[in-house]
Image (spheres, rainbow, N blue to C red):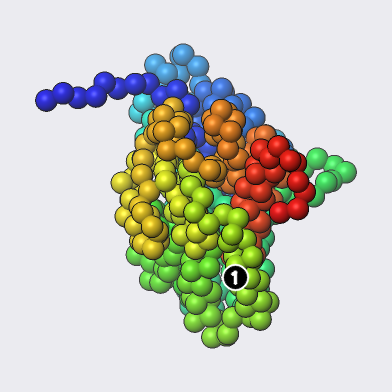
Amino acid sequence: MSKTNYVSTTNACKLCTPLGASLAFRGVEKSVPFLHGSQGCATYMRRYIISHFREPMDIASSALGEKHAVYGGGPNLKKGLLNVMKKYSPRVVGVATTCLTETIGDHVSGILHEFKEEFGDLDLPELVHVSTPSYNGTHMDGWTGAVQAMADQLVFEKTETTESVNLFPGMVSPGDVRNLKDIFEHFGLDVTVLPDISETLDGPALLDYEPIPSGGTPVERIQAMSNAACSIEFGRCLPGSTAGITLENKYGVPCHGLGMPVGIRETDRFMDVLAKTSGRSVPRRYLMDRGRLVDALVDGHKYISGKRAVIYGEEDLVVGLVAFMSEIGVQPILVATGSKTGKLAGAIAKVGSDLRQQPLIREGVDFHDIAEQADELAPDLVIGHSKGYRYCRDWGVPLVRVGFPIHDRFGGQRLRILGYGGAQKLYDRIVNAVLEKKQADSHIGYGYL
């Protein structure tokens, strides 16, 4: 039986697993992300994250070298933790492993146990650890794993049931997190968002530098998540063990698993859960937002109906985008992700059941694979992050930038796509991208569309 030869990755459609974990840990108040591995990992990730969020991003490292690859990195990990405590005085240190430490087999939980015993006389921070080798997953796996680790390792035993709600939104922008918090407030719900990157990765200008940015989910709120009335977790392609499922299994907190609320139907499902949880009707402001979005779909339909799109990025983001495309008349022709969970096709079939035809679905691919197929499919537009720009330029089609990373445009950390209001903003950008392309290609150069 013939087998296709393996071709090395040339331009991955994913990012490092510990990078996602570092972003998640940044969403906890007084938290410092810490990579147990070589210094280069932390340096690369800091640079990559800063380029998107335009904010300082400190990531500590155990800075292992050749010696530690042979004899183990335990001593460096302990020394690094003491240095972080001295410099930052953190409340939480989130320790994520890297390829190096996973390969040599460092037993991180054991090392951290030894550290607590050896330095128990000090005022130690909470130590959370997560396994994040980059050869086994993507940045989304790192994010999800870190959030699950915090739910597993920081939450206290249940004492009483309160009316608070836990929200695990997934890797969305700080702008979307702020909007989600407003939505809960308007429903009269007390929400704990984990992680809350709305300020830590998109803060105000300050006169004095803060070693640890203000904001983030307070540790006390995380510890009390077991007392919540319920959890809401976004994602149709999540692994079997998540933060929401962990709290449900350990403490009996019911978990509502929802798709990422992009577009009308997915947001309707989200609003229904909030209405039932709060015992209130959907606030008028959101009914008005929904009505304005429907009106916009009617107004813009003639410009984008039947357009063919290539969509790529994190699995759950891609699923949400396909759900929205099926509402606005855009036909996804190729849907691609660097993840390999095997769940993408089923999720796409569920949210895109009314598409004229099901798109070609590719998992575990890099941009070389995407470009090869997309070039033959002749798309009208591409939706995804900045790494697809070079291909869009070659094809002469517009790129609507969504997700992470966005390195070649300004304000990626403030882009909103969730809820009716976020979908409205995304729809405007899609329609305008198509109009701009049509206008630029016209030999007349007309200005009325």
Which element is circle 1 on?
helix
Specify the quadrant that holds the N terminus. top left
| Left or right, 432 with reference to 167 | right
Q: Is residue 32 visible?
A: no
x, y (%) of residue 180? 61, 64
- Front-most of 344 and 246? 344
Where residue 121 sits, quadrant-wise, is top right
Q: Residue at x 54, y 86 (%)?
A: 279
x, y (%) of residue 153? 45, 53
Hey, which residue is sitting farthest right in the picture? 207
Q: Residue at x 36, y 62 (%)?
A: 353
Q: Residue at x 51, y 72 (%)?
A: 268
Q: Residue at x 57, y 54 (%)?
A: 304
Q: Is residue 141 above or below residue 98?
A: below
- Number of labels in the image equals 1
- Front-most of 271 and 255? 271
Q: Which residue is mark 1?
A: 294
